[in-house]
Image: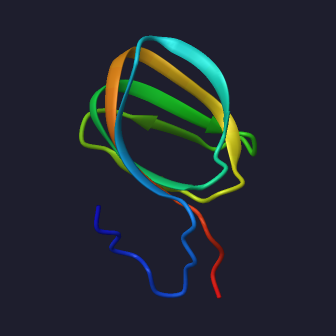
Amino acid sequence: MKLLRTVGVKTPHKSVAFFTSQPAKFHWRFDNDEAFVLIEGKIAITMDDGVRYEMGPGDAISIPAGRTGVCEVFEFSRKFTVVTSGTSD
């Protein structure tokens, strides 16, 4: 893995992965910065502040660490995700 964003960030945790899910609804806490591209399927993420993101194939999002929300997976979905943790200097 080559992490592209390293300036000003301490990264004790780095991971890249493909993630799949069948239809489901669950509460999620983003403990680390997470960016992902939805490859297939349809999902929605409603953050606890009420902001809702509806996503389909090709849509991308970046969510900062510490956010929480409800994830809804409407049909089989697959995403490519990059997770990093650390704090800005």
Determine the residue positioned at 65% across, 88% down.
89
Quadrant where the image shows the N terminus: bottom left
Q: Position of residue 16 (x, y in %)?
A: 36, 50
Residue at 35% across, 69% down: 3
Q: Quick one: 83 or 38, which is closer to the camera? A: 83
Q: Is residue 34 above or below residue 46?
A: below
Asked whether residue 61 appears in the rendered view, the answer is no
At x 33% / y 36%, what residue is drawn? 79
Residue 44 screen position, x and y as percent:
50, 30
Task: Choose top left, top right, bottom left or bottom right for residue 86.
Answer: bottom right
Residue 9 position within the rendered picture, expressed as x and y whole percent measured from the top left: 55, 80
Q: Is residue 39 left or right of residue 55?
A: left
Q: How many marks?
A: 0
For the question of whether residue 37 can be seen, the reply is: yes
- Looking at the picture, the colour scheme in use is rainbow
Is the residue 38 above or below the residue 4 in the image? above
> Where's residue 33, x and y in %?
56, 58
User: Quick check: 6 above or below 86?
Assistant: below
